[in-house]
């Protein structure tokens, strides 16, 4: 696993990311189990603004008898409530699944074509669609925690253990900004 700090201002501006992490199947094959949590960055300082930009699936994950592999992006707080999918819900990155090549999904509309004023099933469907899209938007918002925390990826395989994977590569894009210098500069 490699983590690179993006240095070109043009690249940072175009992507909205300051860092990119590369995770390959080799980072998962040491696990003879169907689940693994990978700490991408450990002990991120309190008052660090974090924004999850998304992932880019370079090569679909595959191998052995695996039939699906999902990846969630979340956080583990040193004190407080952790959220294993706080930045991205479990998303398929496997060749046999319905893999998602790029996240986040663009939220472009809410289907209101089936709104029924009697508040029946159609209305419930629209409300569920709206709730889903709003939750997706909330996961994409920048966050800062008052405690140190770890950025984690949670992988879950179906059909076989992670140790049977033979291919796969995904890039994780995110932005980190230390807020302490900004706060100190504005106190003076």
Image (tube, rainbow, N blue to C red):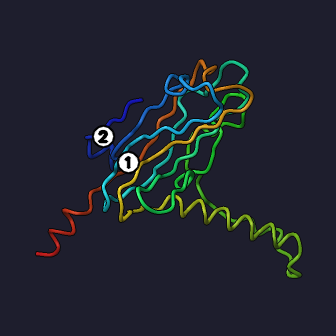
Q: Quadrant of the N terminus?
A: top left
Report the residue marked by disc 1.
17
Query: In the rendered image of this protein, does residue 129 appear above or below residue 173?
Result: below
Q: Nearer the viewer, residue 73 or 126?
A: 73
- Residue 146: image x %, image y %? 35, 65
Q: Residues within 10 Å of mark 1 (few under 14, many from 20)?
A: many
Q: Nearer the viewer, residue 56 or 23?
A: 23
* Of callouts 2 and 1, the N-terminal one: 2
CA–CA distance between discs 2 and 1?
8 Å
Label 1: element kind: loop
Q: Residues within 10 Å of mark 2 (few under 14, many from 20)?
A: some
Query: In the rendered image of this protein, does residue 106 appear above or below residue 42?
Result: below
Dots 2 and 1: beta carbons under 8 Å? Answer: yes
Residue 112, which numbered label?
none
Report the residue marked by disc 2.
6
Query: In the rendered image of this protein, does residue 125 appear above or below residue 18?
Result: below
Q: Quadrant of the C terminus?
A: bottom left
Residue extending furthest toward the front:
79
């Amino acid at each position: 696993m490699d983590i690179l700090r993006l240095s070109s201002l043009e690249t940072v501006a175009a992507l909205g990311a300051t860092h990119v992490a590369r995770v390959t199947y080799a980072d998962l094959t040491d696990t003879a189990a169907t689940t693994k949590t990978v700490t991408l960055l450990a002990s991120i300082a309190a008052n660090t603004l974090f924004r999850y930009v998304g992932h880019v699936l370079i090569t679909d994950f595959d191998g052995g008898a695996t039939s699906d592999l999902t990846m969630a992006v979340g956080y583990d707080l040193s004190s407080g409530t952790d959220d294993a999918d706080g930045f991205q819900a479990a998303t398929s990155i496997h060749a046999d699944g319905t893999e998602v090549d790029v996240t986040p999904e663009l939220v472009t509309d809410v289907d209101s074509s089936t709104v029924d004023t009697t508040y029946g099933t159609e209305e419930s469907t629209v409300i569920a669609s709206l709730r889903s899209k709003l939750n997706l938007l909330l996961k994409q918002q920048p966050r800062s925690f008052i405690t140190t925390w770890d950025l984690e990826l949670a992988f879950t395989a179906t059909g076989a253990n992670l140790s049977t994977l033979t291919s796969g590569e995904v890039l994780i894009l995110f932005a980190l900004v230390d807020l302490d210098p900004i706060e100190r500069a504005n106190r003076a």
